[in-house]
Amino acid sequence: MRENPEPECAYRLATPEEWEAGKASGVIPLRDIDVRDGFVHLSTKAQALETARLHFADADDLLALEIPLERIKDKVKFELAPKRGGDFPHLYGTLRADHVAQAIRLERGEDGFRFGAPV
């Protein structure tokens, strides 16, 4: 059980190409890890930058798709991520483009990624 209150939003890290494909089809594409684990991997805002550092270190152009949890509340569970520790939001269902409130550019700095402006 989570001790902290549930955040208002979750974030899906995506390339601009994935975001464009999602807008065109209406569904955000799955990655191999999502298919393997049986859910869509999401992060809280507090977790997103570390997720970017660990899993997208070579990405030159990265977005954080902001998803209000109210839009996916019936299909999201916060579950322990054994390798990283902490509870991460996992979506058991389809992540639709209309779930996304905005796409925010992640900018790379000397100390890693940071949230930039909406695109």
Image (cartoon, rainbow, N blue to C red):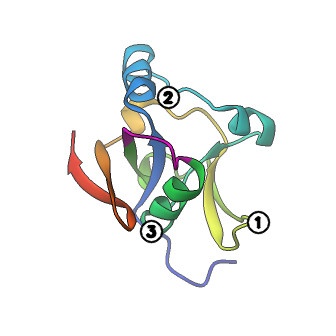
Q: Element type at marker 1?
A: loop
Secondary structure that dominates the magenta span:
loop
Q: Amino acid at mark 3?
A: Pro
Residue drawn at 43 percent across, 19 percent down? 21
From the viewer's perspective, tell me whether residue 54 is left or right of residue 23. Answer: right
Q: Earlier in the sequence, mark 1 or mark 2?
A: 2
What residue is pinned by disc 2?
28
Q: Count of labels shown?
A: 3
Q: Element type at marker 2?
A: loop
Q: Amino acid at mark 1?
A: Lys
Magenta segment includes 58: yes
What residue is pinned by disc 1?
83
Q: Is residue 59 above or below residue 32?
A: below
Q: What segment carries the magenta color?
A: 56-62
Q: Amino acid at mark 2?
A: Ile
Q: Earlier in the sequence, mark 1 or mark 3?
A: 3
**Where's residue 40, x and y in %?**
63, 42
Magenta segment includes 38: no
What residue is pinned by disc 3?
7
From the viewer's perspective, tell me whether residue 107 is left or right of residue 48. Answer: left
Answer with the quarter of the image where residue 82 lies: bottom right
